[in-house]
Amino acid sequence: MRHEVERLQQLREALESIENELADSKAIWEEENRDLLNDKEETETELRELDCEIRDTRVAIYDGTDKSKIFGVGVREYTHLDYDQKVAYDWAVEHNMFLTLAKIPFEKYARYGKLDFVIVKKVVQATIAGDLSKYLEDTDEL
């Protein structure tokens, strides 16, 4: 196992080196292309704003019947449901429908809540230290 742990440490170090080199290259590239990146951001903002304005205008002139496109901008109707979530939840409980378990909060509660249908058990899982170099220096085991 020592050989595998040594290789794992080598791969971690190699990856860290590559990630650092990439971060440095990215920082240099971003600095060299700052004007272009700023232009891109400004263009994206203007595009989003104009897109919304055009959509709002098309919806405003929609007469309820003519969905044809005007300069490529059409309308579509869809069904939107607006409801009080508390009322919907109470209805779902009453009818025993559409209910799902919130697993994460349930398991947090069940861990200490002593529920008779939950078996709490210990499971063994291997862990690997983030920095293996100090362990590789100390021993020749495995």
Image (spheres, grey):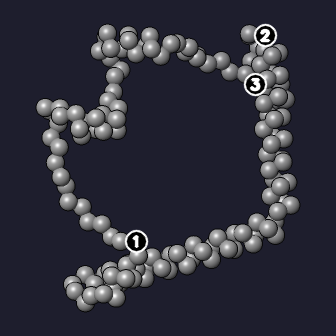
Q: Nearer the viewer, residue 115 or 94?
A: 115
Q: Is residue 101 above or below residue 8?
A: above
Q: Quadrant of the C terminus?
A: bottom left
Mark 2, residue position: 63
Q: Is residue 105 above or below residue 7?
A: above
Describe the element under mark 1 as helix, strand or loop: loop
Whichever of labels 3 and 1 marks the residue nearer the N terminus, that label is 3
Q: Amino acid at mark 2?
A: Asp
Task: Determine which quarter of the picture holds residue 46.
Answer: top right
Say whether residue 112 is left or right of residue 19: left
How far is disc 2 from disc 3 in space, using C-alphas?
12 Å
How far is disc 2 from disc 1 in space, using C-alphas?
64 Å
Task: Determine which quarter of the picture holds residue 12.
Answer: bottom left
Whichever of labels 2 and 1 marks the residue nearer the N terminus, that label is 2
Say whether residue 43 is left or right of residue 122: right
Mark 1, residue position: 130
x and y, in percent, of residue 132 in the image: 37, 78
x and y, in percent, of residue 138 in the image: 30, 87
How far is disc 3 from disc 1 in space, using C-alphas?
56 Å
Mark 2 or 1, closer to the camera = 1
Q: Is residue 89 above or below residue 33?
A: above
x and y, in percent, of residue 106 in the image: 30, 34
Describe the element under mark 3 as helix, strand or loop: loop
Mark 3, residue position: 74
The residue under the point 56% across, 77% down is: 18
x and y, in percent, of residue 125 in the image: 24, 61
Q: Are marks 2 and 3 in contact (CB under 8 Å)?
A: no
Q: Amino acid at mark 3?
A: Gly
Q: Amino acid at mark 1?
A: Gly
Whichever of labels 2 and 3 marks the residue nearer the N terminus, that label is 2
